[in-house]
Each structure stands twice: as structure tokens, then as C-alpha cells.
Image (cartoon, rainbow, N blue to C red):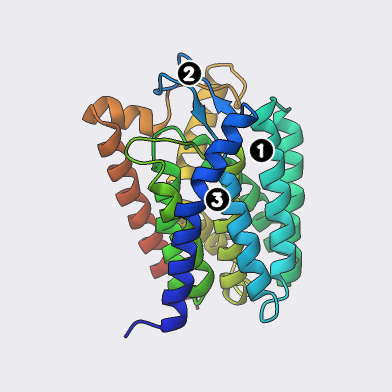
Amino acid sequence: MIDAGLFLLGLGGFFWGGLATPLSIRLARSYRILDLPDARKIHTGQMPRGAGLVLWTGYLLWALYAVAEAPSVRFTALGATIVFLIGYIDDMRSLSPFLRLGLHLLSSALAVLPLGLPPLTAFACAVWIAGVTSAYNLIDGVNGLCISLFIASSAGLAFLGAAPVGVVMAAAALGVLCWNFPCARTFLGDGGSTLLGYLFSAHFLTAAAPTLRGIGLNELVLLLLLFGGMPVLDTMIAFSRRILMGRSPFYPDKGHLHHRLMGLTGSPLWAVVCLVLMQSASLAGGLMVYARLS
């Protein structure tokens, strides 16, 4: 039996994502917020990259609806706003990666502090949120990939007792996906991709906090790795590879998992399918571990 309230939330989120995205495209074109082609990118023309604006405003609307029953959403909404705005500014002019990292850590602390976690657990979780925030940005290199991974991850929140926020976030992202996949008419931009990483990781911790308060560090690390999934794995591999090559870990290249899968399959579509399946498997493993620990 489908819950009517969840269905309406999902429907509202989907239509918001689908109908507001054309407005964000016009805004991006007007203010020249465009992704330009270069040697490490697969698109060949100028692409508006303001779709994150749709997801940010949609999330804030949901937060206004949910704040009466979940007061801590104020902190998550503030953190999400910081993450989105710093990314949106970076879409217009390049900012220092250290400035972005510092603000991501601040936003992560805002999400973690209300949860009442033990100090070491809280520290690890704040670092994890900042890492996932950046990881979703780094893996956003193929049409539909970042959004599809976010949809799969948000759907997993339903199994942790956070179905309303999981449904509305996944539905809004699905509405935006219609404009980003398979043929993109807009990109998320740094503002959008980092926002997705932040929203999933922050709401995962909010939902899982009662269990996280009573587990050891080893179990915590395993859970965070499994729920971080492919974006976190890709980031760890990319950073390790760049450091071993004597480069900055922030140096962009074409050695990400999606690049390698496109080389193996010869198709961006199959690269997305493979990574979404791998993400789903990682989430399923995380849910199994979580169920045993709860």
C-alpha cells in the first residue's frame, strides 16, 4: 500500500525538479554560468551548469515544511546553503580548494553537532560528510552519473526510517535528471554536485545517529565506507594515484572510475549503469551491516 503523504511529497519533488530546471538554464545562460569544453571533458559545447539551484531551493522548501517536526533540519539547511553557494560562486570564478574544504568542514560540523554523538564519532562523521561532499563533485563527469548515484543513495534512506526526506530528494533529483540524461541540456555545476553529496551524507547521519552512538570505531568506519560507496571509493583511488605520481590530490585528470569504465565499455551510458549497480550493492551491504548493529 503506497503512503499517500509520501506519494504527494515525491510527486511535488519530481515536478519541482522537472519544471524549475528550464528556468535555471535560462538564468545560467544569462549570467554566463557555463561549463566550457576542454581536453579532460567529454562534452564539446558550452553547457549551462546551474541545475543545482533547483535542488537547493527545492530542499529549502522541504525544510520549511519539515522543520516543525524536525528542528535539527535548520542546521542541515544552513550547511546545505553554505555548500551550495560556495560551489555556485566557484562555477562563476575559480576558488581555492582549501577555502572550499574549510567551508565544507564548517557545514559538516553544523550537521553533526545536533546529533549528540561521542566526540571521536562526531569528528569522524564531520570529516566523512566533507569528504562525501567533495566526492560527489569529483565523480560528476558523465551525464546523469552524479544524480543517479544520489537517487540510489537517497532511496536507501527509506530503510533507515528517513523515507520522507529520502523520497523528496530522490524525486526532485529525478526531475532534474530528465534534463541531464542521456543527452544533457544542463549540468549540476559544482554547486549542485557538492550539494547532493552533503544532503545525502548529512541525512544519513541524522537517521543513523541512534545506532552510531553505541558502536565502535571499526564498525563506524565500515558503515561510512559502505554508505559512501562509489564516490568515496573513486576519490580515494584518485587522490592516492595523484599523490603517488607526485601531483596535487586536487589536480584534475581523466583517470576516474567512470573514465575507465567508458574505456572498457565504449559507452557513457554503460559506465553510468555499472556504477549505479555498484553503488546499489555497496548500499545494500551497508544496510545489512547497519541492521546487525542496530
- Which is closer to the viewer, label 2 or label 3? 2
- Residue 261 in the figure: left or right of residue 29: left
Q: Which residue is mark 1?
A: 88
Rendered view: 123 above or below 137: below
Q: Along the line of sight, which residue is nearer the eye, 292 or 48?
A: 48
- Which is closer to the viewer, label 1 or label 3? 1
SS for callout 1: helix
Label 2 with label 3: CB-CB less than 8 Å? no
> Looking at the picture, how far across and down is residue 59, in whole percent?
60, 60
Neighbourhood count class around disc 2 (C-alpha, 10 Å): few under 14, some 14–19, many 20 upward: few
Q: Residue at x 54, y 58 (%)?
A: 200
The tag earlier along the polypeptide, 1 or 2, is 2
Q: Amino acid at mark 3?
A: Leu
Q: Along the line of sight, which residue is nearer the eye, 3 or 227?
A: 3
Residue 120 appears in the rendering:
no
Label 1 with label 3: CB-CB less than 8 Å? no
> Looking at the picture, how far across and down is residue 216, in whole percent?
59, 67
Q: Residue furthest left?
A: 265
Q: Amino acid at mark 1?
A: Tyr
Q: Which residue is mark 3?
A: 196
Q: Residue at x 67, y 62 (%)?
A: 121
Residue 101 appears in the rendering:
yes
Q: Along the line of sight, which residue is nearer the eye, 269 or 294?
A: 269
> Looking at the picture, how far across and down is residue 43, in whole percent?
40, 23
Q: Which residue is mark 2?
A: 37
- In three-dimensional space, the C-alpha distance between marks 1 and 2, rounded to whole angstroms, equals 18 Å
- In three-dimensional space, the C-alpha distance between marks 1 and 3, rounded to whole angstroms, equals 13 Å
SS for callout 2: loop
SS for callout 3: helix
